[in-house]
């Protein structure tokens, strides 16, 4: 007899998206999922539009690790230079993090420490055994680093999800030094490179700081947000772990799970890097300016209502962790069709000139 399974709670993000889709209110606003939206559709980069019309698709299988050309271009994008690290194409950032956890299990580094405020899916992917208080005051993190040895720390490179508050370059130099002293390994979740400053080779400072000290590291990247390739599920994983035969074991994991990755997204990414990089980078910078403008406008309009949201203007990327409580968030969704995560995270990219006054009005009525 098949075992009866306990009912699970909906996914904290996708469950809200389902409710949003069923809402018939014409004023409904989705501030939950991390997407750039242009009118009712996901924002599409100009370079992507051009490329989609310009190539012929080859439907042959990719190799188990993925498209070799993509892996090398991704390597240079992530690190700003070439290196000898093992590299793999992954099923976007989530698939990369999943594969990273498989690697940790292989090399017997199963326990992971991360911030007390983090992306909810981190807790479902990794065996999180301890946390530290997330703050640009590094006291809590440094205590945790120095009281443990040979542990894996999970960080986010930039555009911290869900707060939007990032460590400074000096912070990262300190973190890298202390991680190195205590023989720790690092998982770097690199989901938004380019969307903090508009320059991907500025936003990868954390990766470079750790790499410079040759810290054992796995870098997990996504090209969903920064290239607009959401449903192409394009990501990468690179690691400098020195474990004999590791490449063979990683290929075996890939082969036994999804065999090999899809190809279409790699053709777009490769073409952008080769032929449209300057145009893409200009547009990426424009998007970061839009996010900054949205933050400043929301802050100013809330201020008029005598509401101050700390760190809103200082943040980077798509997300801000608002001070709204769960009761207020439920009121916004149930009575006004404004949807956000239960922890108060809002997607700054979901705000525009047509909905911001309605959002501010309903928040001020809480």
Image: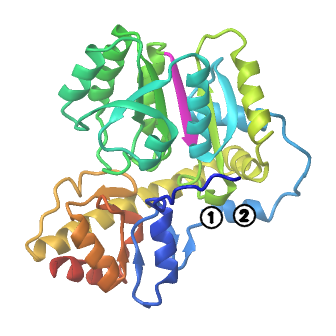
314 shown above or below 353: above
Residue at left offset 61%, top offset 10%: 242
Coloring scheme used: rainbow
In the image, residue 114 lies at what x, y percent? 36, 33
Residue 257: x and y in percent read 74, 39
Q: Quadrant of residue 306?
A: bottom left
Q: In the rendered view of the protein, which quadrant contains the C terminus?
A: bottom left
Vertically, is 111 above or below 304? Answer: above
- Determine whether the residue tagged by mark 1 lies in a helix, strand or loop: helix
Query: In the displayed structure, would residue 178 be above or below residue 257?
Result: above
Spatial CA distance of label 1 from label 2 is: 6 Å
> What residue do we see at 59% from left, 38% from top?
98
| Magenta: main secondary structure | strand
In this view, the residue farthest toward the front is 1
**Residue 268 appears anywhere in the view:** yes
Q: Which residues are magenta?
A: 216-222
Q: Which mark is residue 366?
A: none
* Mark 1, residue position: 46
- The residue drawn where x is 27% and y is 70% is 329
Relative depth, front residue between 23 and 286: 23
* Residue 36 image position (x, y, % from top left): 49, 65
Residue matched to label 2? 50
* Residue at point 18%, 33% (across, down): 137
Q: Could you tell me if the residues under marks 1 and 2 are in contact, i.e. CB atoms within 8 Å? A: yes
Residue 268: percent from the left, percent from the top? Answer: 72, 52
In front: 69, or 142?
142
Q: Is residue 76 magenta?
A: no
* Circle 1 crowding by C-alpha within 10 Å: few under 14, some 14–19, many from 20: few
Which image quadrant is residue 79 in? Answer: top right
Quarter residue 93 falls in? top right
């Amino acid at each position: 007899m098949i075992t009866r399974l306990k009912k699970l709670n909906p996914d904290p993000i996708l469950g809200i998206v389902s409710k949003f889709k069923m809402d018939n209110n014409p004023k409904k606003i989705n501030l939950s999922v991390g997407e750039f939206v242009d009118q009712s559709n996901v924002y599409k980069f100009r370079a992507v539009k051009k490329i989609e019309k310009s190539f012929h698709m080859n439907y042959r299988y990719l190799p188990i690790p993925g498209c070799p050309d993509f892996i090398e271009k991704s390597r240079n994008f992530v690190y700003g230079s070439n290196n000898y690290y093992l590299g793999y194409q992954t099923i976007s950032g989530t698939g990369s993090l999943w594969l990273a956890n498989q690697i940790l299990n292989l090399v017997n580094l199963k326990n992971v420490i991360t911030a007390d405020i983090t992306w909810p899916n981190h807790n479902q992917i990794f065996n999180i055994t301890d946390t530290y208080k997330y703050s640009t005051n590094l006291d809590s993190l440094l205590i945790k680093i120095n009281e443990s040895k040979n542990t894996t720390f999970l960080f986010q490179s930039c555009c911290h999800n869900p707060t939007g508050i990032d460590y400074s370059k000096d912070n990262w130099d300190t973190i890298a030094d202390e991680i190195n002293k205590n023989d720790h390994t690092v998982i770097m979740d690199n989901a938004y490179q380019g969307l903090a400053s508009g320059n991907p080779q500025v936003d990868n400072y954390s990766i470079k700081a750790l790499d410079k000290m040759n810290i054992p590291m796995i870098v997990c990247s996504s090209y969903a947000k920064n290239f607009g390739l959401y449903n192409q599920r394009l990501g990468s994983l690179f690691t400098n772990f020195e474990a004999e035969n590791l490449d063979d074991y990683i290929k075996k994991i890939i082969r036994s799970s999804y065999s090999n990755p899809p190809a279409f997204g790699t053709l777009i990414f490769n073409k952008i890097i080769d032929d449209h990089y300057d145009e893409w980078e200009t547009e990426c910078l424009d998007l970061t300016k839009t996010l900054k403008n949205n933050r400043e406008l929301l802050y100013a309009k809330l201020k008029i209502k005598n509401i101050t949201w700390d760190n809103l203007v200082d943040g980077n990327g798509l997300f801000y962790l608002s001070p709204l409580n769960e009761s207020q968030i439920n009121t916004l969704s149930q009575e006004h069709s404004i949807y956000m995560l239960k922890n108060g995270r809002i997607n700054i990219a979901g705000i525009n000139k047509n909905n911001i006054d309605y959002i501010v009005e309903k928040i001020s009525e809480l």
